[in-house]
Image (cartoon, helix red, strand yellow):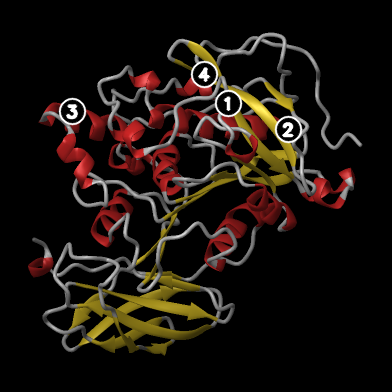
Amino acid sequence: MMLLKMKLRYRYLPAAVVLLAGSLCSAAGNPRQITPADTLPKTTPWDLKALSAAPAFKWTANSVKGVRALHYSGPAYKGKPTRVFAYYATPGSMAGDASKDKNLPAMVLVHGGGGTAFDRWVQLWAKRGYAAISMDLAGCGPKRKRLEDGGPDQGDGTKFGAIDQPNTDQWTYHAVANVILAHSLIQSFDEVDADRTALTGISWGGYLTCIVMGLDNRFKASVPVYGCGFLHDNSCWLGWFKKMSDDKQRAKWVRLWDPSSYAGSASMPVLFVNGGKDFAYPPDSHAKTAALVKAPGKNMRFVPNLRHGHIFDRPKAVEVFIGHYLRKGVALPVVAPASVAGDKAIATVTTKTKLSSASLHYTTEKLPGSPKSRKWIEKPAAIAGNSITAEAPPRDATIWFLTVTDERKVLVSSELVFPAKSIP
């Protein structure tokens, strides 16, 4: 059964996207054009106009469980064409009923380090009523088998050790370009509403999300999970920056590839998700990245004891946040910046749902410290109308914040507070 209408003809593709002659077909519709933000640095290496065009693609025989597999054309790598492997699913493909696929909101799903295109991830979002695409960003195809015409791999050595190579031969260049191309492709499908798309990524996918959301303003919402910028200031990759031969290499990497250069240009609502036990992206770097985003609708979900992982179906806040902007669902509560007044920690909450509980969280351990072993203390907070109040954190607290949970059992938090004395 044909679930998607396709026009099987070739068309012109911009130079940034290499057509694999004789093997790929064109997409059906016309994706929206990216309008680059004026705040983007002049050194931004991507041709966003070219990446706005849907890449040539081909359905493959690797479909599983209602999920379709495809390859699409990516940027040239070391002068040679590349293909990107992806999975795609819709409510109709999952149900075997093409009539379900009309005017769908769509998700672009970005895997983390060691990950690949995940069929289970697109299945999850398709069952929720979305079209969804998940692409491999390690130059691999099905079952993580290396493609002969794949792009760079995703090892840390490739990410940090190739800074003197041409920009267009480096991993972040390809990964970002291929996420944007996946967005252009999914926008072009007839069953997708090109004005209702969102982006989420986990770990290194969250890192990429923080870059892409500043480049591709066609997304209506964005959710980076774990990943953030300021990796050169504090992250588990500080050793790679020490290996760089001089300050020029380090500055070049930060300028080109660190999300701190791009996240502030995001124009859509962003939900930042992280945890106090994450070994890779520490609270200070995460908080600094979130602070760069000035777009309306920014929200935070920081959980003290959340550890790093590649979890697709949680937290529920991700689904609720995206559903609000793409399907007119009820919004998440939003906790305003918290402060101390006398002996109380206070914050106001904007919410359309009933709040069921609230808490104060803090740690007294020195920064940066070890996230895995960091001890977090939780104290109850009182809810009165749209205000939450708790006993103020102790004077030796190094990080503190407030959380609220609503009647849907969805938790959000205030931004993190770092008392001045806690900053090394």
Which of the two residues, 32 or 17, is positioned nearer the viewer here? Answer: 17
Residue holding disc 3: 249
Q: Quick one: label 4 or label 3, which is nearer the N terminus? A: 4
Q: Badge 3: how crowded within 10 Å, few (<14), some, or many (20+)?
A: some
Q: What amino acid is at disc 1?
A: Leu
Query: In which quadrant will I find the C terminus?
Result: bottom left
Q: Residue at x 17, y 36 (%)?
A: 243
Q: What amino acid is at disc 2?
A: Phe
Q: Position of residue 34 (x, y in %)?
A: 51, 28
**For the residues marked 2 and 4, what is the alpha-carbon distance in whole angstroms?**
18 Å
Q: What amino acid is at disc 3?
A: Gln
Give the number of the mark in front: 2 or 3: 3
Residue holding disc 1: 147
Which of the two residues, 356 or 161, is positioned nearer the viewer here? Answer: 161
Q: Badge 4: how crowded within 10 Å, few (<14), some, or many (20+)?
A: some
Q: Position of residue 40 (x, y in %)?
A: 33, 31
**For the residues marked 2 and 3, what is the alpha-carbon distance in whole angstroms?**
41 Å
Residue furthest right as drawn? 1
